[in-house]
Amino acid sequence: LIACLSLNDQLNTNAAEVVQFFKSLAIKTVLLSGDDQAKCDEIKNRTKIDEAYAQQSPQSKFDKIKELKKYGAVVMIGD
């Protein structure tokens, strides 16, 4: 091994506040991420997101959103 590089996105400073706002309106929060499980668990714990799905490809995110739409309206927030 010559080098190891790890890049991390910074969690928005008001992310937990936004999640709590949605939860106060009885809106279920779900994280769909391409990141590994450890990173998703960290974000879930810090923000109190209801569910987190790690290592999601764009197609698997799309499929999960279609599945969630069976239960009601779905809104995607993110990049």
Image (cartoon, rainbow, N blue to C red):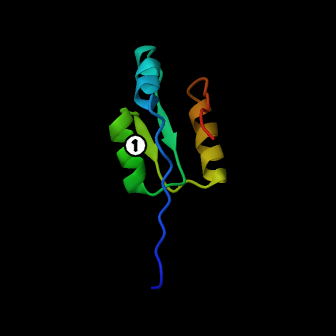
Residue 16: % across, % down: 40, 29
Badge 1 marks a residue whose secondary structure is helix
Can you give x and y, in whole percent of width and height, for residue 71 in the image? Answer: 55, 27
The location of residue 78, given as percent across then percent down, is 60, 37
Q: Residue sitting at 53 percent across and 48 percent down?
A: 33
Mark 1, Cα crowd under 10 Å, few <14 / some 14-19 / many 20+, is: some
Q: Residue at x 58, y 43 (%)?
A: 64
Residue tagged by mark 1? 43
The residue sitting at 61% across, 32% down in the picture is 76
Whether residue 18 is situated above or below residue 49 in the rendered picture: above
Q: Number of numbered discs present?
A: 1
* Residue 26 falls in image quadrant: top left
Tell me which amino acid carries mark 1: Ile
Q: Is residue 76 above or below residue 27?
A: below
Q: Is residue 8 left or right of residue 67?
A: left
In the image, 48 versus 8, the foreground residue is 8
Left or right for 12, reference 44: right
- Corner quadrant of residue 67: top right
Q: Nearer the viewer, residue 68 or 3?
A: 3
Specify the quadrant that holds the C terminus: top right
Where residue 63 appears, as percent x and y from the top left, is: 63, 46
